[in-house]
Amino acid sequence: MNNLKEYEEEIYKCSRCALCQSVCPVYKSSLNECAVSKGKFNMLNGVLNGDLKITAKLKKYLDLCTGCNACKDFCPSGIDVRKIFIAAKYEYYKNNKLPLLQKILLSYSFFCVVLKTASVFMKLYRFFKIGSFIKYFEKLLINSGFIGKYILLIDSLSKNVFYETTLKQVSGTKNKTALYFDGCFNKYLNPQTENAVKKILYDSDISLIKKDFGCCGISHLNDGNIEEFKKIVQNNLSKINTGFDYVLTDCASCRSVLKDYKSFFDSEAAKQFSDKTTSVAELIKGLNFEATKPCTVAIHKPCHEDFDFSGIVKNIKNTKYLEVEDYDKCCGFSGLFALKNPGVSKKISKSKALQYIKNNADFVLTTCPACILGLEQGFIEAGILSESRPKVLNLYVFLAQYCKVQE
C-alpha cells in the first residue's frame, strides 16, 4: 500500500482540465466542485505542501466519491484517482487519534455484528412473510417519504427469487476445484445467487468447496481503513488449507478486491489467492442459454466489473437484448457511499433507473448485489411501483431460473 507522498507526482500531473467533471456521477448530482477529482487534488496539493492537514472535514470531501473510477478512464494523464484517495484516507487514520466509540464502529468486528444481526432480521422477515404484507401498502410507502422508501428498499433485499437449495455437487467426477467465495450478501442477506451458481455449475467439471470466508473487505479498503482491511485479508487467507484451481466469486466488487490481495501481503498464499480469483461469468462464457419464455433483457455493468458479460446476455436465445444508454455508468449505491451521502446516492440511482424505464426492459441483469440495491433504490426514488418496472436480478439468478443450458 503506497502512502500519499508516493503519489505526489501523479497529483501534480493533474492539469485541472476538468474533463473529469463531465463524467463524475457525484458532481452531476451535486454540482459540488469538491466532488470532482480536480477539486480533491487541489486539497491534496495543500496537504503535500504542508498547508493543510487531512482532518475529518477534509476526509468527508474525499468520501464524496463512489469509487467508480470513471475519471481515470477519461483522464488524459490516466491518473488512478481511486488509489490516491484511498492512500489519502489512510493518512487520516494514521495521523488522527479516533475516539474509542468511533474505533469500535469502524472495526471489522462491529461490521460482522451488524451483518449477523441483519441476517437474523432477514430470516425473521421471510419467516413471517412480511413482504407479502408490505406489497399491499407499496403505493402508500413509496409516496410517504424516506422512511417508507427505506422500508421498500429493505423489502427488496428479502425477495428469494431463486431458492433451490436441494442441489448437491456430484463427488468423484470433477476435474477441477473452486473455493467458492460467497461474500457478505450471499452469506448473511440472501443466498439466492449462490443457489443459482450451484445449479448452473451442477453438470460442470468443477467441484465447489465452501470455506468460512468473511467479507472481501471492499468497504474498509475504500474508506482507507487499511489496518482493518488487512485483518480481513489475513482472515480469508487463513481459511485456505487445501489445493484449488480457482477462487470463484459471483460478485464483481468482491472479484476486484480479491485480485488485489497480493498488493497488501507479499506471500505465496496471497499471490495464489489473487491470481486464481475468477468470476462465474468467466467460467460459463462458453455455455449457451435459452430463455424458457420470450423476454427483453438489459444489463447494468458494475463499476468494478472488468469482464464483459454482455456477450453471455446477448447470446441468450429467445430474448431481445436492449443496450440502454449509460448501462456501464455508476448506479450510485457503492456501499458506504450510500450511507454517508444518501441524498447524492439517491439522485444518481434515480437518474440511472429512469434509463431502464424508458427502454421497457423486462429484466435488468447485473453481477453485483450492491448494484441491485442501487437500481432498486432508483426505481423507488422515481416513484415507480414494482409492477411497472423491470425485475433487477443477478445474472446467474436469471440464468438459473428463467433459462436452460443448450446442449
Image: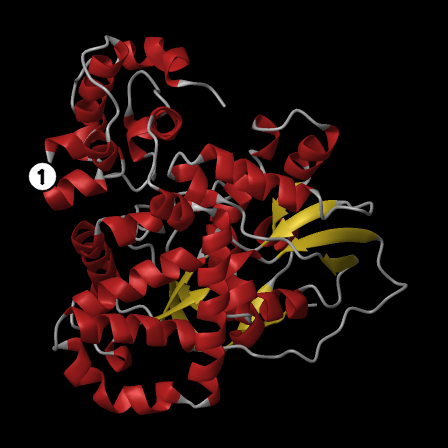
Q: How many marks?
A: 1
Q: Determine the residue positioned at 22% across, 36% down.
A: 23
Circle 1 residue: 31
Residue 169 visible in the picture: yes
Q: Give the quarter of the figure containing the C terminus.
A: bottom right
**Image vertical order of residue 48 relative to residue 242, above or below:** above
Q: In this view, does 268 lie to the left or right of 219?
A: right
**Image vertical order of residue 193 relative to residue 339, above or below:** below
Whole-percent x, y for residue 160 in the image: 48, 78
**Image vertical order of residue 309 relative to residue 289, above or below:** above
Q: Determine the residue positioned at 11% across, 31% down.
A: 33
Whole-percent x, y for residue 317 in the image: 52, 67
Residue situated in front as seen by the camera: 333 or 315 = 333
Residue situated in front as seen by the camera: 146 or 207 = 146
Residue 325 visible in the picture: no
Whole-percent x, y for residue 22 in the image: 17, 33
